[in-house]
Image (spheres, grey):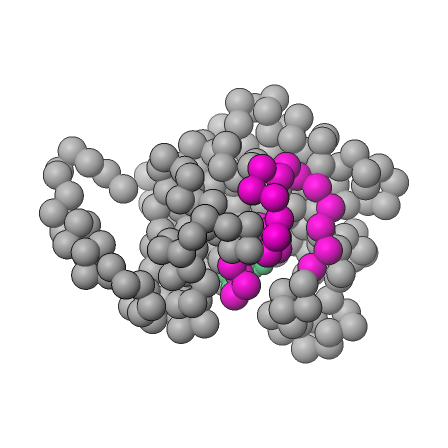
């Protein structure tokens, strides 16, 4: 599994924990890969994405500790971090299910607008918009928000077997509409989902409010043949 951080997937994690506690599922044989990680935080910083996912999800399931992978953001070796992460993903046979959120600027992972649609895991510089969006996790102090991250690339994300993007609330309505119905463009990295043969987008009414064909999508979903899952 590939996991996103941020608030969007929290309900998904809560549901997976519920199913684990109900003994419906186990993560004992699962390998987990984070989408991205901040560069420049102290190891173990509670705002690191690794700490976030351990707190919100991994500590509550039976995933073996060594099966949680995140980009290596140590200063030494930063230039090879992306390649090493790609090799680790490849060594387990790739990512079957990738959970995604979407940034207000249309990013997935931390692939900011203008990221190559073929990009692989690498160092990226955050946009001012992304740093402002994430300041809430850093005492609303912009100076504390890291400037760099290592993120899976758009091409890395597109290699996963099934992409599931979740978005809620009115702030996501614009980027969601541009990603789903706008042109395929590096300016909206989430529009790359249009290239994927198996992508599912889960929205609340507010996040879906700018979709031109919303009625058609509802009709399609309601009329799905019973053999066709999401
Ligand atoms: C960050 C993460 C993304 C996430 C996005 C949206 O930028 N790197 O993976 O999708 O935030 O976060 P939220 O779900 O909190 O709106």
* Residue range corresponding to the magenta coloring: 103-126
Image quadrant where one finds the C terminus = top left
Determine whether, in the image, residue 80 is placed left or right of residue 137. Answer: right
Image coords of residue 214 (percent x, y): 24, 61
Which residue appears farthest toward the bottom when viewing the image?
A: 140
Magenta: main secondary structure equals loop
Q: Quadrant of residue 153?
A: top right
Could you tell me which residue is drawn at 51 percent across and 59 percent down? 106
Tell me if residue 177 comes above or below residue 117 in the rendering.
Answer: below
Could you tell me which residue is drawn at 37 percent across and 54 percent down? 180
Q: Is residue 14 visible?
A: no
Determine whether, in the image, residue 218 is placed left or right of residue 207. Answer: left
Q: Nearer the viewer, residue 147 or 88?
A: 147
Total numbered badges shown on the rendered structure: 0
Image coords of residue 25 (percent x, y): 37, 37
Determine whether, in the image, residue 200 is placed left or right of residue 193. Answer: left
Quadrant of the image where one finds ligand 1 = bottom right
Asked if the stretch drawn in magenta spans residue 117, the answer is yes
Could you tell me which residue is drawn at 76 percent across and 61 percent down? 147
Q: Is residue 215 visible?
A: yes
Image coords of residue 205 (percent x, y): 29, 68
Which residue appears farthest toward the right when viewing the image?
A: 76
Image coords of residue 17 (percent x, y): 42, 49
């Amino acid at each position: 599994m590939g996991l996103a951080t941020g608030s969007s997937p929290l309900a998904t994690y809560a549901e997976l924990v519920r199913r684990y506690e109900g003994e419906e599922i186990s993560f004992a044989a699962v390998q987990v890969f984070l989408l991205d990680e901040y560069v420049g935080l102290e190891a173990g910083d509670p705002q690191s994405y690794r700490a976030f996912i351990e707190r919100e999800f991994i500590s509550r399931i039976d995933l073996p500790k060594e099966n949680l992978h995140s980009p290596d953001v140590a200063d030494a070796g930063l230039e090879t971090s992306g390649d090493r992460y790609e090799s680790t993903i490849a060594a387990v046979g790739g990512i079957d299910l990738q959970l995604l959120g979407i940034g207000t600027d249309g990013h997935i992972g931390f692939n900011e607008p203008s990221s190559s649609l073929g990009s692989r895991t690498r160092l990226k510089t955050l946009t001012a918009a992304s740093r402002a969006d994430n300041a809430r996790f850093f005492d609303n102090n912009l100076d504390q928000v890291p400037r760099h991250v290592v993120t899976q690339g758009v091409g890395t994300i597109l290699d996963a077997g099934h992409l599931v993007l979740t978005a809620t609330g009115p702030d996501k309505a614009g980027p969601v509409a541009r990603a789903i119905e706008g042109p395929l463009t590096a300016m909206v990295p989430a529009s790359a989902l249009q290239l994927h043969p198996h992508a599912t987008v889960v929205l609340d009414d507010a996040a879906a409010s700018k979709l031109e064909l919303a009625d058609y999508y509802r009709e399609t979903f309601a009329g799905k043949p019973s053999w066709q899952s999401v």
